Image (cartoon, rainbow, N blue to C red):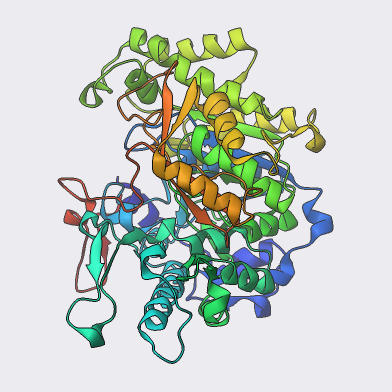
């Protein structure tokens, strides 16, 4: 059975029942049909939140298909529920780009999914659409102000870095020219599109505490400069109020259910290779207000989503996770041990051993934050006992707790050992043990180099001439105290896709540095990283279809 077949075989509970299990009143729900609802921000209770245990699920550097962080997160939550614990899972929303491009769906897998699977993967409650519209409204307002003769801020169009966004993988839109066709069509200039998940509006939504904070952050978006070299922000265009109005529903977290009928919150969807890669602060705080254990995840490997979760989100929102569950797979270790993608299902214990340094580096990185790591082996049917034992022996040698999980095939029952390990470890941890890797007021270059050397393993950092200009601009704008959100490939600890395993003695190259002053971070772009992905030779969209009865097929 495919993931979609398994999802369709489940009889869903009405969302009112799911809300009732959390003690949420039906009149507080904003219904999107029978199985989805928006939740009011008034549910967040800081007194309860501070008592909840926050568990971060991360992973080693993934293969292109991913190693199952979402699946492990959902399965771990199911396992905790089976142990009788008050637990909830809080996840990101899928982007349509990967759904129709490579992944074909991103709601977990097998018997560890969030439902309704088709709805969540396709539009859901419209959050991405609202973010896209708010972002592109600002784009239109910028162009209108440049064109206008009477309401003109004297913006130098050459300095405008704000692009447009679209939730589709379309590489042809990365660099475009707009305003062609004559004087009534706008001012011709070069610009481009990012994917919606990389929008600063997405980042802002995911870090905002409330509507007022959202509006302030939207107003602080840096646009460019006037001809007299004065900086221009969205608030100067008086557009942040209208943008916030478009986001009035998108700011509210979404309530759904897991395949075993347990509550789940899904909200926000920034990628971790080009943005901060975690769900909204509001969703995380809401989950912690509703349960004793809150399971959440951060995109791609720990070098990306995990690092940003801890250095950006946790410092911004005063969150203190106590455990990091490190998702590892035999196939990814073989990949980092030098095996070709097409051979990953073939047994090869030696390749597993050669790939262990990648897992080792991620474990060391977790420990730099003074957080306890636990290894979760996400089991696949092709895994052999001898290969699994290699990871267990590695964990024993390093003094790290490890659990074999089969949540894809068994759901919560396949995560009981992992859930018990998490509970046992949390009995001995302390929230106040967590320490970020750097302080925000550290100089910008030093912050970049701390991440590059401590998390990636780089020996040094090289800055292009453009990056040096960008650093000077950041200093002149007084934005040097913002944290770092690195745009880097997920395929390697380095900025070179081809360097698998645990690269060392390499130089991280920073080609430019973008300013996200509304979100409240700086984005160094390394290597050949793109903020608008492309489609593969055979996109997942080729398999997705719908019949006359509305039955969707091809999601997986």
For the residue pair 239 and 391, the one nearer the viewer reads as: 239
> As drawn, which residue projects farthest toward the right?
47
**Residue placed most toward the observer, 384 or 351:** 351
Residue 383 position in % (x across, y down): 36, 20
The residue most toward the bottom is 150
Q: Looking at the picture, tell me which residue is in the foreground, 16 or 446.
A: 446
* Residue 117, position as x, y percentages in the image: 40, 58
Identify the image quadrant of residue 138.
Answer: bottom left
Marks counted in the figure total: 0
Along the horizontal axis of the image, is 11 left or right of 519? left
Q: Which percent across, then down, holds residue 53?
A: 74, 43
- Location of the N terminus by quadrant is top left
Single out the residue that lies furthest toward the front.
228
- Image position of 24 (left or right of 258): right
Relative vertical location of residue 179 with respect to residue 329 in this rendering, above or below: below
Lateral position of residue 271 relative to residue 320, left or right? left
Residue at 34% over, 52% down: 105
Indicate the position of residue 540 as horizontal and vertical percent values: 23, 51
The residue located at (46%, 89%) in the rendering is 151
Residue 141 appears in which quarter of the rendering? bottom left
Q: Residue at horizontal 66%, vertical 33%?
A: 437
Q: Is residue 117 visible?
A: yes
Is residue 84 something one can see in this rendering? no
Residue depicted at x 53% and y 82%: 242
């Amino acid at each position: 059975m495919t993931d979609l077949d398994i999802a369709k075989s489940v009889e869903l509970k009405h969302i009112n029942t799911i809300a009732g299990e959390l003690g949420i009143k039906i009149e507080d729900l904003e219904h999107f049909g029978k199985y989805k609802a928006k939740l009011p921000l008034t549910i967040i209770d800081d007194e309860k939140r501070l008592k909840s245990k926050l568990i971060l699920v991360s992973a080693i550097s993934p293969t292109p298909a991913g190693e199952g962080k979402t699946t492990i997160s959902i399965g771990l939550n199911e396992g905790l529920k089976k142990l009788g614990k008050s637990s909830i899972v809080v996840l990101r929303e899928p982007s349509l780009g990967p759904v129709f491009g490579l992944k074909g769906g991103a709601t977990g897998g097998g018997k560890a999914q969030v439902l309704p699977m088709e709805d969540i993967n396709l539009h859901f409650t419209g959050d991405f659409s609202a973010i896209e519209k708010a972002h592109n409204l600002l784009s239109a307002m910028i162009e209108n102000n440049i064109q206008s003769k009477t309401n003109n801020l004297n913006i130098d169009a050459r300095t405008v870095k704000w692009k447009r966004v679209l939730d589709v993988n379309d590489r042809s839109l990365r660099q475009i020219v707009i305003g062609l066709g004559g004087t009534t069509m706008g001012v011709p200039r070069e610009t481009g599109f990012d994917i919606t998940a990389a929008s600063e509006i997405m980042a802002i939504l995911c870090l905002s505490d409330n509507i007022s904070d959202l509006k302030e952050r939207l107003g602080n978006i840096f646009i460019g400069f006037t001809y007299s070299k004065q900086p221009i922000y969205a608030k100067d265009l008086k557009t942040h109020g209208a943008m916030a109005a478009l986001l009035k529903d998108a700011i509210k977290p979404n309530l759904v259910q897991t395949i075993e009928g347990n509550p789940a919150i899904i909200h926000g969807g920034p990628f971790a290779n080009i943005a901060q890669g975690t769900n909204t602060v509001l969703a995380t705080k809401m989950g912690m207000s509703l349960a004793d254990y809150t399971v959440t995840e951060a995109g791609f490997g720990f070098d990306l989503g995990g690092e940003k979760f801890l250095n950006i989100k946790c410092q911004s929102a005063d969150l203190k996770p106590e455990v990091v569950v490190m998702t590892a797979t035999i196939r990814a270790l073989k990949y980092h041990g030098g095996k070709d993608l097409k051979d990953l299902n073939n047994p090869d214990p030696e390749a597993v051993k050669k790939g262990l340094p990648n897992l080792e580096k991620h474990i060391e990185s977790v420990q730099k934050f003074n957080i306890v790591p636990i290894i979760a082996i996400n089991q696949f049917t092709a895994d052999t006992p001898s290969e699994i034992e290699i990871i267990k022996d590695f964990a024993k040698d390093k003094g790290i707790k490890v659990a074999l999980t089969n949540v894809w095939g068994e759901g919560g029952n396949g995560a009981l050992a992992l859930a018990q390990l998490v509970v046992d470890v949390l009995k001995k941890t302390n929230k106040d043990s967590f320490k970020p890797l750097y302080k925000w007021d550290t100089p910008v270059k030093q912050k970049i180099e701390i991440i590059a050397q401590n998390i990636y393993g780089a020996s040094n950092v090289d800055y292009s001439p453009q990056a040096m200009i960008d650093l000077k601009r950041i200093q002149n704008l007084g934005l040097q105290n913002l944290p770092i959100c690195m745009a880097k490939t997920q395929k390697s600890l380095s900025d070179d896709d081809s360097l698998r395993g645990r690269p060392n003695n390499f130089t991280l190259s920073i080609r430019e540095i973008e300013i996200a002053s509304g979100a409240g971070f700086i984005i160094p772009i390394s290597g050949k990283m793109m903020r608008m992905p492309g489609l593969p030779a055979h996109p997942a969209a080729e398999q997705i279809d719908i019949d006359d009865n509305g039955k969707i097929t091809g999601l997986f």
